[in-house]
Image (spheres, rainbow, N blue to C red):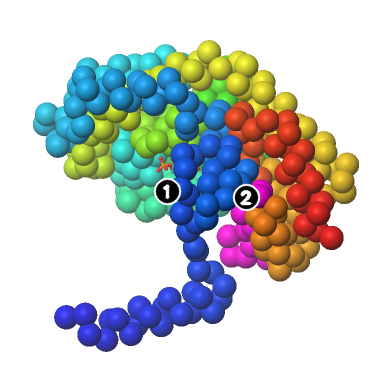
Amino acid sequence: MYGTIKTQLRDQLDRIEADDLTKREFAITSRQGSHVTIDGREVRNFCANNYLGLANEPSIVDAAKVALDEWGYGLASVRFICGTQQIHRDLEQELSAFLGTEDTILFSSCFDANGAVFGALFGEHDAIISDALNHASLIDGIRLSKARRLRYRNRNMADLEQQLMNAADARRTVIVTDGVFSMDGFYAPLDEICDLADRYGALVLVDDSHAVGFVGPGGRGTPELFGVQDRVDILTGTLGKALGGASGGYVSAKQEIVDVLRQSGRPYLFSNSLAPSLVAGARRAVELAAEGDELREGLFRKADLFRARMTEEGFRLLEGSHPIIPVMFDDEQQAVQVAARMLDQGIYVIPFSFPVVPRGEARIRVQISAAHSEQDIEDCVAAFVAARE
Ligand SMILES: *Cc1c(COP(=O)(O)O)cnc(C)c1O
């Protein structure tokens, strides 16, 4: 009986509204891309994770269509019963070849990959040491394990070392970090993390969702950027950002780790197989990322251009090189106002304020895509300038 629960939930929603925390959705009436249609109006989109511009790439759409005809719409089964087609194994092998790992296991999302990995590999005699700013899916996934949980301050190596000492009696210890922190565009210092892991005999797990496909000279992600590809033990990542932007996630790691996940990863055992059209689209996306030097060069050239032009115009940015570029505001209200005025000028950006980011660190997070033109970048800068007046 719903009864008084209705009132309780209404109150809960009213409190969210009163705190200005209600999330609203704009319905896009076009494909995803650097330009989208909202409310019948075309706007330039600077808030998608469409780093390589592949969300609307014709050869990926075609590969998905061909797979619909050849492999059908869905599997109606989990992988181990009757839900594995040849293309699932093909994509797993191609991801392993791209990432330089021994094997890969697919999930419906990276949220599920992170929900599988900790419970399957770490138990009550183990310790999981996690960066304080890790993604929600890592935090939730870690909660599903019976291991001891320790946390270190964001990218703080002295604190990480302290936690490693605190975990000295554990059977297995794993250090868990995002490769890129999505609110800042900062990289985790994987070289230092791997050094500490070696010194204390810990494993390293990196969730490279905001890096795979475009960070590092060959797009292999933050381990490649830091020259530690053979020292990161477990990679998790998404197919829903640079690698085509549809859905899917993976864990890519040493053979035994992947084998254990196929036996004991709960979202793998108890959730449906990735649909064949998504698998085929992702295979094409991985192929494009592997040969994507030009896409990456364009992406980082435009990110650099945006950083340089905004700095010239006197805006304060968080420093870095990642295509996540936070434009900082002293005043939360101003960030909200600037974003609203920019939308009026046809530039779609999102403001973030407390509690998503610390108080006093309100920002508009701009995300550059290889699909943006230099004119798009200039127009975005011009809109920031006009909107701040
Ligand atoms: C986006 C993201 C995820 C979630 O990926 P999905 O495949 O959409 O579930 C997980 N971890 C990190 C770090 C992310 O940025």
Which image quadrant shows ligand 1? top left
Circle 2 residue = 348
Q: Give the magenta range.
A: 346-362
* Disc 2, SS: strand
Magenta stretch, main secondary structure, is: loop
Q: Which amino acid does label 1 sit on?
A: Ser
Whether residue 313 is visible to the viewer of this picture, yes or no, is yes
209 relative to 157 in the view: left or right = left
Label 2 vs label 1: CA separation?
A: 26 Å
Q: Image point 26% across, 42% down: which residue?
A: 267
- Which quadrant holds residue 227? top right
Which of the pair 86/187 is nearer the observer?
Answer: 86
The correct choice, above or below, for 95 with respect to 378 in the image is above
The correct choice, above or below, for 304 with respect to 325 in the image is above
Queried on whether the Cβ of the residue with tag 1 lies below 8 angstroms from ligand 1, the answer reads yes
Task: Estimate how packed mark 1 is, as few (under 14), some (14 to 19) or many (20 or more) residues with alpha carbons within 10 Å.
Answer: some
* Residue 137 tag number: 1
**Residue 278 is covered by the magenta coloring:** no
- Which quadrant holds residue 343? bottom right
Please count the marks in the image.
2
Q: Image point 43% across, 20% down: which residue?
A: 59
Q: Where is residue 45 in the image (x, y as percent from the top left)?
A: 60, 43
Q: Where is residue 218 in the image (x, y as percent from the top left)?
A: 57, 17
* Disc 1, SS: helix
Nearer the viewer's eye, disc 2 or disc 1?
2
